[in-house]
Image (spheres, coloured by chain):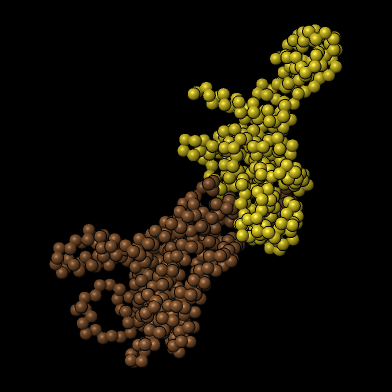
Chain colours: A brown, B yellow
Amino acid sequence: MTTDAEVVAEEVPAEESLRVGGWRAVARKEIADHILSGRFVVLMGVLGIATAAAVFAASGGIRDVAPNAQGITALFLKLFTVTADPVPFPLIVFVGFLAPLLGIMFGFDAVSGERSQGTLPRLLSQPIHRDEVILGKFVAGLAVVAIMLTALVLFVSGIGIFRLGVVPTPTEISRLAVWLVFTIIYVGFWQALATLCSVTAKRASTSAMIPLGVWLVLTLFGSFIFGAIASVLSPRDGSDAAEIAYQQTAQTVSQLSPVTLFQNVSSVLLDPEVRTVGLVTVEQVDRAIVSELNLTQSLAVVWPQIAILVALTSVMFAAAYIAFMRDEVRA
Amino acid sequence: MAASTIRSRKLTKTYGEHTVVDRLDLDIEAGEVFGLLGPNGAGKTTTILMLLGLVEPSKGKIEVLGLDPRWHPLEVKRNVGYLPDAVGFYDPLTGRENLRFTARLNGLEDFEDLISSLLELVGLAEAADQPAGEYSRGMKQRLGVADALVKGPSVLILDEPTTAIDPEGVVEMLALIQRLAKEEGVTVLLASHLLHQVQTVCDRVAIFVRGKVVAQGTPHELAAVDKRGNIRVEFRLGGEPSKGRAALESLGTASGITPGRVPGSWVADLHSESLAPAVSGLVSKGADVIGVHRLDEDLESIYRRYFEIEEEQEEVPA
């Protein structure tokens, strides 16, 4: 008996295959699951229709102004930032709405789904580290999001080229690429938050509702909350100095919200004429020459915001990671 | 270190004030089928999770294949196949796809033939390409056994493997477990509360109640030996019944003598080592010994008896 058991044990390749990344096997399965899932198909359909509507409206708007606007630069990027009558908001705002939803959609049942299907003990009894499970799931979700957003940008560009006949310049392409990477990180924040909830919440519905609630509050009541915090930190007394201090505090506080960060960074990255995200007084812009920033300059403007968002995403992922490592396997 | 495949010493797990596993000593030898039997909530699953390194023990030592699962979880999990209680699968994936995922997690390559043969082994060859969501509980259980075998384990830990399987399936499952142990030399740890089902395949069992092992041994040993080490024996004696009883009483080793099922037979408890002297003693006293029959209780009644003891103890402080 003993010898038989030893033979069986020896058949298993021991050390060398321990190094094969188990997270890749997890990610591979998760990506396949996402792409074959009903929600992905529905999402792509809705996304396609919404994008097409937005981009047709934008290109219509651009056509209207283009003839009498001689010196307009970065015309191609206007596809993302301009809208016209029937569609209420430009694409950039649409992506701002969409990104949190995508993140939540690919994160909320990451762990709670395994738990409710009863697959978690089986998964964790395989020879992979526990962190590979959460890493694989996170990478898979972001990979699918990256595919969707890239497809969306290419789709918009295609329609833009076709309708407007404007070909993007290399600068515009690099601006779009940087913005795309930034948007994926932004989705990553929401996905990490949803994953954290999926570890701690007992039910998938709870873990979907919490990040959705956070998103709604930050989107709808964000400015109200930041104003309230600012009025405590630097109260207004009617003087101009106090008013400026208040506005600046509100501005600073708002930079802790990923929603605000995304709006600020997007507007700078996709519009070379925007040269600040902060408070600007009339004196400061008086006789300023309207000119374009290059990408490096635009990045310099929003560098702090990008850093904060990367930090927020990392912290959120670390929280989800730690919660999962400490999680009891038993339900 | 001892050669035991699974070994624990004073293994303890507490959650706050509540002790789930209490100073558990286990020694499971290679190639043996070991039954961990106890009611739900006795701490069986917690023990298993500690053996797999998925739950941190509060105190005590564990060795699985000579390794501590706390420090070498991957090596342990590479060689230990685990069928969890109420096993689940990814519903949209077919049975075969679920096994492929497990094979990839184990870093295997060229696993298609292995998976087909395992599906064949557990009788799911026909349902292999149906989504696992359409499987019955029993089918999932069988797929779970195949899943645990994908890695070619030398140790198999099965948590409630026969629950939710129809009686015919239970027989097949038990035959499979026995075959794996005897032919492949796989060490099997089987946790169950359905002891009448599993006692037939276990080489040894431990009765596990409220985190403690209350009895351990072969089913045969357990069945007859009570806490005083006595066995229950039926003596069929010819001649006058009362003389037979007197002869038994005069031995001095038999206690609790009661009439047996037929006239002239007496049931008595005595220590297993004093059985042979008792028979020769009876013969030398001139008793007409027609038959001596050891009344093996089935595990069920032992099990119940231990529960009763436990419950009495529980009631005393209250």
Please identify the quarter of the rendering in which residue B107 is found. Answer: bottom right
Which corner quadrant holds the N terminus of chain B? top right
- x, y percent for residue B51: 60, 44
Q: Is residue B200 above or below residue A46?
A: above
From the viewer's perspective, tell me whether residue B254 is left or right of residue A204: right
Please identify the quarter of the rendering in which residue B236 is found. Answer: top right
From the viewer's perspective, tell me whether residue B274 is left or right of residue A82: right
Seen at 77% across and 23% down, the residue is B294
Q: Is residue B152 above or below residue B246?
A: below
- x, y percent for residue A125: 60, 51
> In this view of the protein, which residue sits in the foreground, B237 or B280?
B237
> In this view of the protein, which residue sits in the foreground, A300 or A70?
A70
Q: Is residue A291 above or below residue B220?
A: below
Q: Is residue A313 above or below residue A197?
A: below
Seen at 55% across and 52% down, the residue is A116
User: Is residue B67 something that shows in the picture?
Assistant: no
User: Is residue B179 something that shows in the picture?
Assistant: yes
Residue at the extreme front: A86
Seen at 69% across and 39% down, the residue is B34
- x, y percent for residue A31: 56, 66
Number of labels in the image equals 0
- x, y percent for residue A273: 32, 82
Please identify the quarter of the rendering in which residue B216 is found. Answer: top right
Seen at 72% across and 22% down, the residue is B231
From the viewer's perspective, tell me whether residue B92 is left or right of residue B315: right
